[in-house]
Image (tube, grey):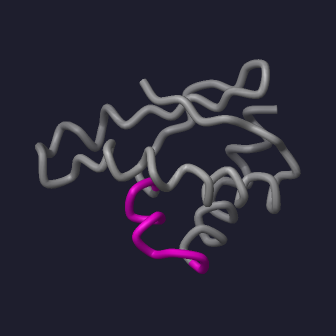
Amino acid sequence: ELSELRSRWNDVLDYVEREDRVVWLAFFDARLASLEAGVLTLDFSDSRKFGSAHEYSQSRERHKKILVEAIAHVAHLDVTIAEL
């Protein structure tokens, strides 16, 4: 199912952006690392290379609900979000 979600990821991000651009900013550079037992693991290691100006980990925790809703709406998956 991870490959299917990857193929729809831009649609998920478009949905998030329509709901809240700040939330989109927090998640747009995520890489989908794995999807196992309903847990979607996101990898932000590439974005962390740029330093603290691009570090949104604290705000992402507050905004995961919108991302989960977008995934459910676009890809019809119920997931929880974890980060590497």
Residue visible at 67% across and 60% down in the picture: 12
Residue at far front of view: 62
Residue visible at 21% across and 52% down in the picture: 54
Q: Is residue 38 left or right of residue 31?
A: right
Residue visible at 55% across and 27% down in the picture: 33
Q: Is residue 54 above or below residue 32?
A: below
Q: In which quadrant is the N terminus drawn?
A: top right
**21 in magenta:** yes
Splitting the image into 4 quarters, where does residue 9 fall? bottom right
Q: Is residue 23 above or below residue 32?
A: below
Q: Position of residue 56 (x, y in %)?
A: 29, 50
**3 in magenta:** no
Q: Nearer the viewer, residue 29 or 23?
A: 23
Q: In which quadrant is the C terminus drawn?
A: top left
Residue at far top of view: 37
Q: Is residue 42 left or right of residue 40?
A: left
Residue visible at 72% across and 57% down in the picture: 69
Find the magenta span and give its range.
18-27
Q: Position of residue 65 (x, y in %)?
A: 61, 53
Splitting the image into 4 quarters, where does residue 43 fall? top left
Q: Nearer the viewer, residue 7 or 19?
A: 19
Q: Is residue 64 left or right of residue 25?
A: right
Prevailing SS of the magenta stretch:
helix
Q: Nearer the viewer, residue 27 or 6?
A: 27
Q: Position of residue 18 (x, y in %)?
A: 60, 80
Residue at far bottom of view: 18
Splitting the image into 4 quarters, where does residue 13 fall? bottom right
